[in-house]
Amino acid sequence: MLGSTTSSRLFRKAVTCATTGKVQTRSLASVAQTASLQPTAKGHKVVVVGGGAAGLSVGHQLLRSGKFGAGSIAIVDPAEYHHYQPGWTFVGGGVKSKEELRRPLGSLIDPKLKHYQEGVVSFHPEKNTITLSNGDALNYDHLVVAPGIKINLDAIDGLQDALKDPASLVSTIYSYDYCDKVFSSIQKLKQGTAIFTQPTGVVKCAGAPQKIMWLALDYWKGQKLYQPGQASPINVVFATGLPVMFGVPKYSQALNKLREERGVAAMFEHDLVSVKSNIATFKSPHSKELVKKSFDFLHVAPKMGPHKFVSDSVLSNELGYLDVNEETLRHKDYDNVWGLGDAAALPTSKTAAAITAQAPVLVKNLLQAIDGAESSNKYDGYTSCPLTTEYGKVMLAEFKYGQELKETFGGMLGIDQAVPRRAFYYMKRDFFPWVYYKSMVKGTWQGPKGWST
Ligand code: UQ1
């Protein structure tokens, strides 16, 4: 038993994780104590891991608070380029080029932020340090962890080879390398079965696997290769690991109605496990045996999951995601560690729109922590999924924790956001990418809440 005189700084608890068996040493060091740490040569008041939508938003919002001098905040990310990933659906649909959606990461980072173009090898929250891939250690008062998640192309047997094969019509919008192969494959298909898959488990933007299907279907319709409700050269199948079209009932019902009207066959609760020549194999709770289906075109939403340096660390929960409080975004065990974005264990859909709501909450709570105050700002789980249902129309799904609706335009003039609209399409195609690079990654756009200084 630890006596009451034991300072919290010395208080360590060893927790054995039930599923991994790994022993996690957890520090309950308070912020007041860590804040008194003298920064070393490679020390920063705040170290942000990740230069994606989340890391850049937080880094720049912190800088704009005026409370940090040059070099006080660091961003760690090995990537050369930053990608506007929500735009990859439009690359797949032949509407945008993948090159126009990316920027050199360095060009997006304010010179007052120190940029380490390195990966992270390990976290040492009990020592307030992280170890970089070049072997250096970085010391911090506060750590913000936002490295995103990994696309695991290897998790589906045969997928990598099929993607690499220029002759196969197998593609994915979930990869910079292959998102342009999607449109060329759509164009090449003249007849046969087109399958679009969505895996069980975590994915970025749960709507994207069907957004690309609706665009492809519209393209084939324009080519007279697909006519809803009639025998057509091309037939379309949506094979999803989920039992429904979408996680929120209102949008799910609207999307299922579209699916039926458009004659798209559904394979619910079918999870793609392998791709071999023109055979896709699925696992399903409805069948003892694996389900095999031949295809002429296959669009795959791959399996995704946390980076190993996150899942192997004491910062992760048993599923490998950052174990943060769902409302404050503060780590459950380490008071000076924060997490947001795709890598965080937040029960909501992983999107750029979610970051517009998460970043300001985290930043305000972190600034309060520096002042020795409790976190009073709460993230409500807001996220949004602008679903392209055809060229020129988008259904704007917006919701929060508990699959509860949180529609920006829902209250206005009786606008029903489950009805696909032209205005939402232009918002997604033109306004969001513009506001993203112009303002959001610079820390001055808070989504539906608008601009901030
Ligand atoms: C948003 O803020 C945003 O970031 C720039 C997106 O880009 C991916 C979005 O898709 C959405 C829906 C939002 C939310 C903003 C409004 C005004 C609904």
Image (cartoon, rainbow, N blue to C red):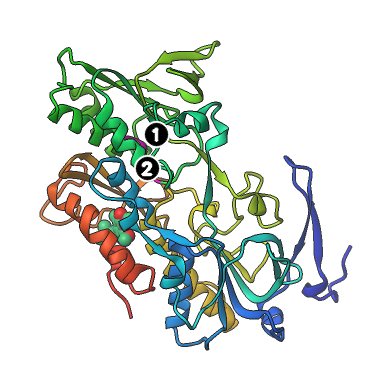
Tell me residue 404's x, y (percent).
Answer: 35, 47
User: Which numbered disc, 2 or 1, marks the residue that appears first in the sequence?
Assistant: 1
Res. 445 visible in picture? no
Tell me residue 400's x, y (percent).
Answer: 38, 52
Which one is in front, 368 or 233?
233
Find the magenta span and give its range: 205-210
Which one is in front, 301 or 10?
301
* Residue assigned mark 1: 171
Is the C-beta separation of discs 2 and 1 under 8 Å? Answer: yes
Q: Is 298 placed left or right of 45 in the picture?
A: left
Q: Element at badge 1?
A: strand
Judge whether residue 209 is colored magenta. Answer: yes
Q: Residue at x 38, y 45 (%)?
A: 403
Judge whether residue 227 is colored magenta. Answer: no
Type of amino acid under label 2: Cys
Q: Which mark is residue 179?
A: 2
Q: Residue at x 43, y 76 (%)?
A: 61
Q: Is 220 placed left or right of 244 in the picture?
A: left
Report the Cα–Cα distance between label 2 and label 1: 7 Å
